[in-house]
Image (cartoon, rainbow, N blue to C red):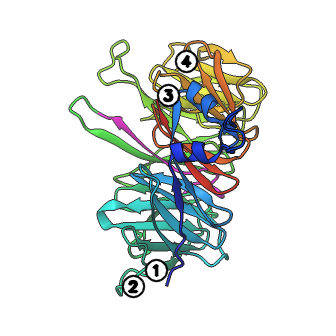
Amino acid sequence: MFKRLHTTIVPLLLLIAGSVNPLQAASEPKEVTIAGSTISSLQSAGYRVDWINQVPTNELRLPTILQDSFYTLNDDDYLSRYDSVTGKWLWSTPIGNNVFDMLSISSFPRLDKVYVLSDGLLYSTNNLTGTATSNGIEKPHVHLRWVPNTPAIVSDNLLVYGSTKGDLVWLNPSTGAVSARYQIGDSISSVPVSISALRHPDGRMLELIIGASKNGTLVAIDKGSRTQAWRMQLTAPVVAPISSATNTELIGEETIPRSSVFIAGQDQYLRAVDTHTGKPRWRVLTTAPLEDAPAVYGDVLYQQIPGEGLACFTTFPQDFSGNRKWTAALVNGAVFTTNAKGRLVTWDAPAKVLQILDPFNGTVIRTIALPEAKNVLTDSVQNGSIFILTENDEIIRLAPR
């Protein structure tokens, strides 16, 4: 039997009313705070509090948004699912046994399954009921021969992760069988990425999985043939997730739009390489190792550079040395979404600060401290709702206004 975790969804009006002491109501009511910030501050940033789920548990972690669901794990390795639109608790079920480190949560809606990858086992449960069943083929958990070192991504009907031995591993989650494996280098250092780009004017597509190892090797694998498309060797590892984008215009005599992969490296370089060949398009030497993924929005790219601030670059410049448009020295967070007015939203996790920026020059429009926030994430990179997991294990959804 699984342990039911009762939760309380707090409507905003009741929350505000309950926060006012009746003896103070006639004088100066105290404004309610959300994750340590006032509601008026959040409204000025373009957000309203949609719901708050108060969870009577401890140490929620690994918050994950998948389709219309919000998942968390707690300190006892119970997996919980919530409706991300309403905040309603749906189910909780025991997954692990506090032996393995949990790395990622993935769902397969077609199969009504959710999978939790750890550094030793792959756990599974029914996504509708939260019950783990064994049908003789699929078990509640399977042992993994190639130990995961990264979160998994979903590619077609398989999970793909990086192993401690330097392999990219394609895993059939239903059986635990390894469909394919490709040795990159030593231990994989960052989560693999799946990238698509137009291959031919007739609509044929190039589909790649890109992985990076701790020895600085970067390899792009063709998803169909599972063979190497290209490889590059850097002098330092890439720990930030890799980004990609396709140009909206044709340049020169091109017959298909230009597509690039963007790499923020520990060697202090921000690079753009051709998606098809891995050949360099442009690169910029920065003043510090890069930890955050490049955020691409059309013809501009935003990169957080430690010690410098948030920098904006042209996504597809003609110059090999790149084109930096501006740097916002007062912004120490990375761009993770935009608000309803198209302004940039950044999150500085160490300082626990949310900032709203003008996308054209990096001017800071609003700065909101969220001292009680543990994790901040979004359901969309454009006009996304913001989900906050607090130190007190409240789950909060801020919707764009």
Q: Secondary structure at mark 3?
A: loop
Residue at x-position 59% and y-position 17%: 322
State the residue lying farthest toward the bottom: 136
The foreground one among 379 and 147 is 379
Q: Is residue 311 left or right of residue 315?
A: right
Between the residue at mark 4 and the residue at mark 3, the CA separation in whole angstroms equals: 11 Å
Q: Secondary structure at mark 2?
A: loop
Judging by the rendered image, the residue that carries numbered circle 4 is: 359
* Res. 394 image quadrant: bottom right
The foreground one among 9 and 215 is 9
Which one is earlier in the sequence, the residue at label 1 or at label 4? 1
Q: Secondary structure at mark 4?
A: loop
Task: Point out residue 34 in the picture as x, y percentages from the top left corner.
Answer: 64, 42
Between the residue at mark 1 and the residue at mark 4, the CA separation in whole angstroms equals: 47 Å
Judging by the rendered image, the residue that carries numbered circle 1 is: 140
Residue at x-position 44% and y-position 23%: 298
Which one is earlier in the sequence, the residue at label 4 or at label 3? 3
Task: Point out residue 202 in the picture as x, y percentages from the top left corner.
Answer: 20, 32
Which one is earlier in the sequence, the residue at label 4 or at label 2? 2
Between the residue at mark 3 and the residue at mark 2, the CA separation in whole angstroms equals: 44 Å
The crowd level at tag 3 (other Cα within 10 Å; few <14, some 14-19, many 20+) is many
Judging by the rendered image, the residue that carries numbered circle 3 is: 339
Between the residue at mark 3 and the residue at mark 1, the CA separation in whole angstroms equals: 40 Å
What is the three-letter code of the residue carrying label 1?
Pro
Judging by the rendered image, the residue that carries numbered circle 2 is: 134
Q: Which residues are magenta?
A: 183-199
Would you say residue 22 sits in the magenta stretch?
no
What is the three-letter code of the residue carrying label 3?
Asn
Which one is earlier in the sequence, the residue at label 3 or at label 1? 1
Residue at x-position 74% and y-position 19%: 329
Q: Which mark is residue 168?
A: none
Relative to 37, does residue 355 appear above or below in the rendering?
above
